[in-house]
Image (cartoon, grey):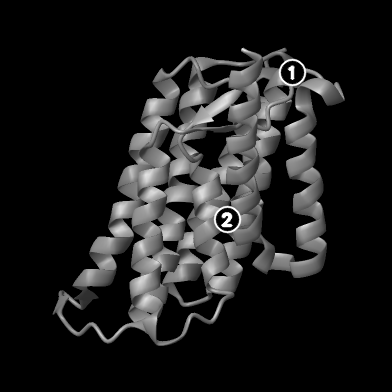
Amino acid sequence: MAIKKHIPNCITLLNLFCGIVAILLAVNGMLGRSAFMIFLAAVFDFLDGLAARALHVKSDIGKELDSLSDIVSFGVAPAFIMYQMLALSSDYTTQVWGIQIIPFVASALYPCCAALRLAKFNLDTTQTEMFHGLPVPAAAFVILSLQFYNVGAYAASIYTAIIILLCIAMLSRFPLLSLKFKNLTIKENIFRYALIGISLILIICLKIRAILFIMMTYFILSIIYNIVYHKEK
């Protein structure tokens, strides 16, 4: 029993480890590898909750450790990637201590909002079947996908606008689908199954470029779910 209760926390620490490696890779300009490590962190982030439920060893320390790991893997690490992308794609020359100011401010805004989102989530007991605001890992995936699109001369402006939109989405109260299954029935999980199915098709067809389209699908299905739910209610 003593060993069993530590298994989910060990998996959570693997999430944190991947986030730290992602930061180091991003600092050295290896953005593709950094993105891969963040994706791997997301796998561990999914597995730790699965392990906790399967082993019946949920704990307060596990919940706090999960959020601390998430802010590194899905808050700070994507911010380093975004800083590198902004610095490389812009003509900003104003620097302090060798840091380009505008890319730094834009990139620093994201993990601050991600931390606030995670703190609010920990205190909110209503986010079981639905999320209120965009989950931090989902926002991180949007950032990761941007490096695989050629947005031309306006890249810096587009990246900055996307960061602002992601921050607003994370801190909003808009209800979005949660992929937490209470059971496997099709009737109660039709929208979740639809999201998973469409996502798999998009990934097969578009690979890493599918992320933005998956996020659009996620928002559309959430809107339809809310309309249907309120009508039934």
Indicate whether 179 appears above or below 161: above
Q: Residue at x 59, y 72 (%)?
A: 32
The residue to which callout 2 is attached is 38
Indicate whether 193 appears above or below 36: above
Residue type, mark 1 in image: Lys
Tell me: 35 left or right of 120.
right
The answer to which quarter of the image holds residue 118 is top left
Q: Residues within 10 Å of mark 2 (few under 14, many from 20)?
A: many
Helix, strand or loop status at disc 1: loop
Helix, strand or loop status at disc 2: helix
Tell me: 85 left or right of 129.
left
Residue 93's spot in the image, x, y percent? 19, 85
Residue 122's spot in the image, x, y percent? 43, 23
Nearer mark to the viewer, of 2 and 1:
1
Q: Quadrant where the N terminus lies?
A: top right
**Along the viewing direction, whichever of 230 and 54 lies nearer the viewer:** 230
The residue to which callout 1 is attached is 182
Tell me: 58 left or right of 163.
right
Q: Quadrant where the C terminus lies?
A: top right
Instruction: Say if residue 34 shows up in the picture.
Output: no
Q: Residues within 10 Å of mark 1 (few under 14, many from 20)?
A: few
Residue type, mark 2 in image: Ile
Task: Estimate the spatial distance between the alpha carbons at disc 2 and disc 1, rounded to whole Å.
Answer: 27 Å
Residue 100's spot in the image, x, y percent? 23, 75
The answer to which quarter of the image holds residue 221 is top right
**Along the viewing direction, whichever of 184 and 118 lies nearer the viewer:** 184
Q: Residue at x 46, y 59 (%)?
A: 78
Q: Earlier in the sequence, mark 2 or mark 1?
A: 2
The furthest residue to the right: 185
Q: Residue at x 49, y 21 (%)?
A: 61
